[in-house]
Amino acid sequence: MIDIILIQPKAGPYDMLGARVPYGLLSIASIPHRKGYKIKIIDQRTDHLWEKTLIESLKQNPICVGITCMTGGQIRYALHAAKIVRENSKSPIVWGGVHPSLLPSQTLENPYVDIIVVKEGDNSFLEVIEAIKNKKPLSKIKGIWYKENGKIFSTPEREFIKNLDTLPEIPYELIDTEKYASLHLEEGRSLDFITSRGCPFNCSFCYNQFFNKSRWRAMSAKESVKRLAKVVRKYNIKAIYFQDDNFCANIERLKEICKGIIDEKLNIIWGTLGLRIDTAMKMDDEVLNLMVKSGCRNVDIGAESGSQEILDMIDKKIKVQEIINANRKLSKYPFIIKYTFMIGFPGETDKQVMQTVNLALKLCKENKNAYTPFAVYTPYPGTTLYHKASKAGFTPPKRFEDWADFSIDNWALYFKSWNQKSRIRRLNSISFTSLFSNKNIIYKINKPLTRFLFSLYYPFARFRFKFNFHTLPIESMLGRVVLKHF
């Protein structure tokens, strides 16, 4: 018996790196799972016969089908799944995730969308399930949008969950953990783990402004370690990736978690998505040595730009010199450091782009464990900078399905932008070669074939990026064509 089907769509080209656990689906499944609902998770990335699996599962007449998606190509795969649901079942289709939360009204105009759970969906989704099951009105449920008799309705916003310790444990048992990996730092299984939500900062390009209202909420260190220990031992995990937006926001809490990992003798290595430059500058030797002793081998840091004018424009609240100083400080420790950068902002000059490239090269020169992937700025809805982009000439897609072509890799080539196409191609070449120009990135690549292809392209990519040689960027143009059909 299946009560609820949850679908994880493909993400497109990024699936070539490997599949991380569908953490968002596991999170919203946790409360219904604890209440005894039978949940089936179908992951397009790991089930090559997912269509057959979905059609067979629909024969059990589930209460509803849930689908998550981000802005971009994932929408195309999600809509394909929703179409199969509609053609084979009368079960309502409930959407969630970042993009439907950002643009709920436009999303609901699509015929394959019935209900949207907006933002934090833990409690809202359970109430939707029970309302559908018991044939009760949706209007009393906070935090949703829905269609009724062809009209679109919304309900009052739901309050954030204040105490994350009260949430159930993530039900990893709903998936086959052997099919997923997060870090390729050593042999053995690796998984994602999240201990907090949101970020207290207000960077003008980030979805957190809208989705979490620039607030940070965290599970207690004690509860985080308790749950982590259970997962590590149950699934024989060797590496953990803390995918919190700002895992290190509270340094004292971070210290407690590190001490807990050591005291529990978990013997893991770990990395984290969430460390800021200003936080790194506040860390003393005690904190950094605790991180090393507890197994930290990777930190991701948003450096964003080598231009102070751009850093100020995006409200990053850091200085270029602080980035340099933090890198020198961290170079003394065995962390692989991923500094992420963006180029192509509205109003950004070629000089400012080169300031960013030069800073990236400097960071790698001064820290053998650093690498610096670039992305071309993408104007995501719900952010402050999105409005600036619109004023600069960007015209957003008019329909939900059109956002499927809004890829981080090629949106500026297919939608109106403030950049000329020749400049866009140059920016894309800088971004493309940055991904392959440093061998430190290899720990992020879990698929053997992709690792092999990386080794072949690495020398040429390094030459292009290091010497700013982006004339006739044939491989990046070809790469986009191939990846568009991935």
Image (cartoon, rainbow, N blue to C red):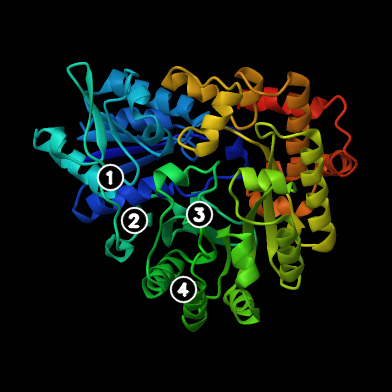
Q: As drawn, is 484 to the left or to the right of 402? A: right
Name the residue that disc number 3 marks: 201
> Residue 253, which numbered label?
4
Q: Amino acid at mark 2?
A: Pro
Q: Tag 4 or tag 2, which sits nearer the N-term?
A: 2
Residue 5 quadrant: top left
User: Disc 2 and disc 1: Cα gap in Å?
Assistant: 10 Å
- SS class, disc 3: loop
Q: Are dots 1 and 3 in contact, CB under 8 Å? A: no
- Which one is closest to the eye, mark 2 or mark 4? 4
Query: Where's residue 12, x and y in %?
Result: 56, 32
Name the residue that disc number 1 marks: 39
Name the residue that disc number 2 marks: 171
- SS class, disc 1: strand
Which image quadrant: the C terminus? top right
Q: As drawn, is 412 to the left or to the right of 355? A: left
- SS class, disc 2: loop
Identified at 60% across, 56% down, the residue is: 183
Check the image and report above or below for 272 versus 411. Answer: below
Query: Where's residue 353, x and y in %?
Result: 77, 39
Q: Are dots 2 and 1 in contact, CB under 8 Å? A: yes
